[in-house]
Amino acid sequence: MIIVMQADASQADIDRVVQRVEGLRLRPHVIVGTERTVVAVVGDERDAAGSGFETLPGVASVMPILAPYKVASREVQSEPTVVRAGSLVVGGTSIGVIAGPCSVESLEQIVETARQVKALGATALRGGAFKPRTSPYSFQGMKEQGLELLAEARRETGLAIVTEVVSPEDVPLVARYADVLQVGARNMQNYRLLEAVGRTQVAVLLKRGPAATVEELLLAAEYILDGGNRQVMLCERGIRTFETHTRFTLPLATVPWLHARTHLPVVVDPSHGTGHANLVPAMAAASIAAGADGLIVEVHPDPKCASSDGAQSLDFPAFGRMMDLCRRVAEALGRTLG
Amino acid sequence: MIIVMQADASQADIDRVVQRVEGLRLRPHVIVGTERTVVAVVGDERDAAGSGFETLPGVASVMPILAPYKVASREVQSEPTVVRAGSLVVGGTSIGVIAGPCSVESLEQIVETARQVKALGATALRGGAFKPRTSPYSFQGMKEQGLELLAEARRETGLAIVTEVVSPEDVPLVARYADVLQVGARNMQNYRLLEAVGRTQVAVLLKRGPAATVEELLLAAEYILDGGNRQVMLCERGIRTFETHTRFTLPLATVPWLHARTHLPVVVDPSHGTGHANLVPAMAAASIAAGADGLIVEVHPDPKCASSDGAQSLDFPAFGRMMDLCRRVAEALGRTLG
Amino acid sequence: MIIVMQADASQADIDRVVQRVEGLRLRPHVIVGTERTVVAVVGDERDAAGSGFETLPGVASVMPILAPYKVASREVQSEPTVVRAGSLVVGGTSIGVIAGPCSVESLEQIVETARQVKALGATALRGGAFKPRTSPYSFQGMKEQGLELLAEARRETGLAIVTEVVSPEDVPLVARYADVLQVGARNMQNYRLLEAVGRTQVAVLLKRGPAATVEELLLAAEYILDGGNRQVMLCERGIRTFETHTRFTLPLATVPWLHARTHLPVVVDPSHGTGHANLVPAMAAASIAAGADGLIVEVHPDPKCASSDGAQSLDFPAFGRMMDLCRRVAEALGRTLG
Amino acid sequence: MIIVMQADASQADIDRVVQRVEGLRLRPHVIVGTERTVVAVVGDERDAAGSGFETLPGVASVMPILAPYKVASREVQSEPTVVRAGSLVVGGTSIGVIAGPCSVESLEQIVETARQVKALGATALRGGAFKPRTSPYSFQGMKEQGLELLAEARRETGLAIVTEVVSPEDVPLVARYADVLQVGARNMQNYRLLEAVGRTQVAVLLKRGPAATVEELLLAAEYILDGGNRQVMLCERGIRTFETHTRFTLPLATVPWLHARTHLPVVVDPSHGTGHANLVPAMAAASIAAGADGLIVEVHPDPKCASSDGAQSLDFPAFGRMMDLCRRVAEALGRTLG
């Protein structure tokens, strides 16, 4: 931690900072500059979080040096984590493809989708049974019945099931059916939920919140890892910006940035990231080129009849074309899609 | 709802849209323009949410006409809601002032704070017992013990207690102690939690998420109102933007905008909204001038020793100066502070 | 400047950084931490701007300590600058009020507006003659003829004229007519224009660009100050964020933040900052409460007939009510409006 | 245009809107809904821009239907524009690669860079002679001398020259040397400059402003096209968002979105878009996969000695690896790089 003093800080102000640093059993290092004095603090500054240096008289600002996450860091584990959950492998040279409808709507819909996306190369099936919806008047999902339909689709096709869990008390139920527990963007900082999925040994797909920094995403992952569950995939699904021509703004530089800092695999969701089916294939291919370890894509037998997110869902032929495009990019980079 | 066709849409495309509108028991109105055709849809378009018009061939875009919230709307209730919770009155001519530490830390800390802020004009005491924290390695709050200390502070001072609840399963417990249940910014779209507080009759302070639109805030309120709890206060606490000199960007135009559309009272949090104690008094005064019905402000006996959010906490003298400033502005506008 | 080394930086990496610092005639200070080494650099780091430390092997990040602006800084001049331009005084205890139409449209329009806003308390007249417009197909202003009409309005009322200049080659012409040269938000980083207005002795109103940080605003002011013109007013007019219910997001915390760092006065534009006439009065009052030294507001005799920005223009009665509101707030804070 | 009336609008309000529409020689179409009335306007609504419907009593909002740009639109020209400027071809199956330093610094630097990037596959040379810099104290470029060095590098290598012009009065000078005039992000809405480059027949690279919407970018292009210059390339270089781990956020969905709406080719700048050399190759490859028609990349013989933008510049070996990666992706998609 670097504590920058104000230009007019007194010696007493500096002494007060030094004393406080020592009180935290850290080592202060005073550097008198031409315009300002700074105090460099040696030791594990994470112990000093919330220790209020900013509020001391004469202090201009406080700058942390160390990244606040630990277990997720490449400095702790240098080789990449490969997540395996049934038919799904994400990380290393394998690029996983999770496809399916926003919401589970019927046995026929989910089984047909599972068969078709599997034939086109998907390695897991997504489908929402518990749906967090912006409006209380929107369709809220089929709940446990939806989970049973997903399990039936797995029996039929062998595809691993990825489905969202929205509340800690549902974790045991959803974990009985799912191969991967999805923590949605709205719940990225629902810490009780993170703790609850951290206590299971089921793989987790953790989506970035639309206003979350990448550091906050890693700290959210840290809650799960810290609970003992190391099967965590990070998912970039777009952030909220001033752009309105897309539903969210999909910042793919997140992918190489995360790869440099964490061993956890990175999945991209071009469906939510754009909100428009016609932009999904190009952004899926771009995700692969940026180094993504997986894709999660909304596919529906008849998007215009989808009970949610129809505008961003691909139909089967469009999904087939997307897979073809992505496969060519993956192969050009020496990776295997699906 | 207005459905805008593409410039090259065929008659068959238009017919398909018309048929689908009729299938939803709504009335289509086709208007042939010089460059494009639009289909205006008459009837309650909320019934058509998720009906996938955007995915039909030849459709360029779909624009909703009606606001998606109902019970929160001024069109349903024109007179402003006044929330009363013990000593706290928010709405109408009364401006409530909720003050106290980020976290409850000890009996002495919370009782001393309660006494001081009450003497300076606060009408409710805030204090976190269950703390949602970005990092799993940060202090997570005193939990039930913290609630007991808050209750003790209420016995001593008569101040109503405002405290956060972070999980649906905690609602009964927290509701036994609190006069106002705070739903934090990270949980604004934790729908299970909204439903749970909606089933109580305890007043709710609903904070805007840092990436939430004002419409999403009203829809989150709608979850609570729809559950039967009408004692809801909305809270603007800043949004995430590219600005880094403040912790969040505090957009006060939210206040008059909300007042024009909803009968629910609006509270502002200048502490989180700026992140720096020295900016809080000016922004508190600006909130009052913008028409806020309440303030929620972090105050701590010794901010440099606070276990969380010290940098944005006022000490007692600074809170006193802030109250003085706000009282003068409130009186100039014919309102009563505290 | 603090240079943070990577956790795995070698001694050779550190030595290379140290050598380079010394090569710039600055003093390095190596601090070996428990997890990382940092090199604190003593001396005027502005000399080291662009010296590429980030690209050296083993360097993780570089953090500046000193603010990059100089002449604008409170550390250089502690007493506030008061800008005086004819009838307009901005700064100190005086709050200036600049009012008028977006565009000058006719002699009658501008003279009538000048008379009315003066009667209601405005101390300067705004009006665009050179209009920067997003679309080439929109009205581009009356140009020099507009300047003559503004001069006529000044002769009639004595009000100082504030008008925009959009290109360096126009500066001599506009400076012949204007009391204050406005540099618009789109031109905040048009450095040739900044240099050109810096070479005049006419007061300047410098508007913040919608994606500019406050530091970039101060550096843009620095271009003008560095040219020898010290009569500079900064203007907050809203930033671009994800919010769509307002045209821009108006972040009033800019006002006290700037006051703490610069001696230049701060003006707020609630018209562009909100984009909706019905939100302007509340935000004007909030600006005063936040400590603004001036307001610039769009007023039009008949907003629905304005050739630009009608939706955000006040008519005379609404402007009168706004002035009344603002005057009460200003007086409560011991300041004089207009 | 769709004019939405307020729920409580009177018949007189509606009549007033209808009259005003007719006064503009457009055709109104009144649709009485269950909760609100809307007036659909038939005719070229661009004629009605700025006609102030939003300010009429009883009007809730006004929604445009037609895109405000014309000449740039695919509806006007369906086949893609291919820009050719000396050795540079951008559009169709050809992907152009513009590489070189941020600033021209010396003859040796620019000629060596030109030779190396040409050998590695670049088809044009970038280099700044007139540099817009955030701080007046930063290096401002070699100006005309820099242009001469660029011309020398062209003589040596045959590479087309891409260089920035920052002021309308410089256009004739820069156009004598440059094959492509770059309009920088800070100047995207410097309309005098757009008009000036629109009067030349030199190809233009128009960079998106960091807070500009894609519609504003197309309207800026419209200024150039409207002047008679049809050789326009659009350039995505990143937008300003809350993210701080990258210098800007690079939103690649812009590429397919623009391709669907305009015939102009789209270039991506991953150097400014990320700000970090180690993120550039992945984002360059992702740009190609997203469908970009060109890349513009900062390359420097010795990034740590660059007089500007060193942190985001590639050295020659890194540029070679980037080109190899991009070439493989381009070939996989049936396109030719360089």
Image: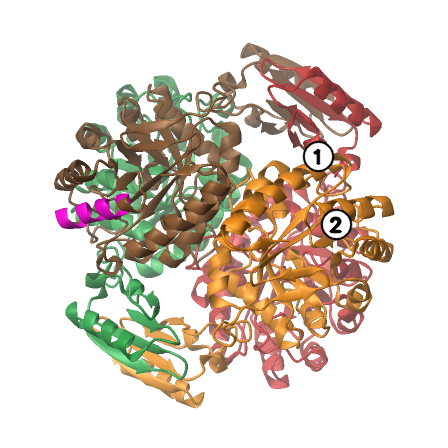
Chain colours: A orange, B red, C green, D brown
Viewer-side residue, B328 vs A12: A12
> Which residue is depicted at the point 53% across and 30% down?
D260
Q: Badge 1 is on which residue? A: B66
Residue A43, horizontal then vertical, whole percent = 42, 84
Q: Which residue occupies 25% across, 79% down? A: C29
Residue B245 picture location, percent across and down: 41, 59
**Placement of D80 over or under B333, stated as above or below:** above
Observer-nearest of B69 and C8: C8
Q: Chain of mark 1?
A: B
Q: Which residue in the protein does label 2 denote?
A: B222
For the residues marked 1 and 2, what is the alpha-carbon distance in whole angstroms?
15 Å
Give, as a three-letter code, the residue at label 2.
Answer: Glu
Q: Are marks 1 and 2 on the same chain?
A: yes
Which region shows up in magenta? D106-118
Q: Nearer the viewer, residue B1 or B305?
A: B1
Q: Please, is residue B148 above or below residue A117 in the view?
A: below
Q: Is D115 contained in the magenta span?
A: yes
Q: The C terminus of chain B lies in which quarter of the figure? A: bottom right
Counting other residues with Cα less than 10 Å from the Cα at mark 1, is it few (<14), some (14-19), or many (20 or more)?
some
Decide: is B102 above or below C151: below
Dot 2 lies on which element? helix
For the point 71% across and 34% down, the residue is B66
Image point 47% across, 22% down: which residue?
A: D79
Tell which subunit mark 2 falls on: B
* Residue C334 in sight from this viewpoint: no
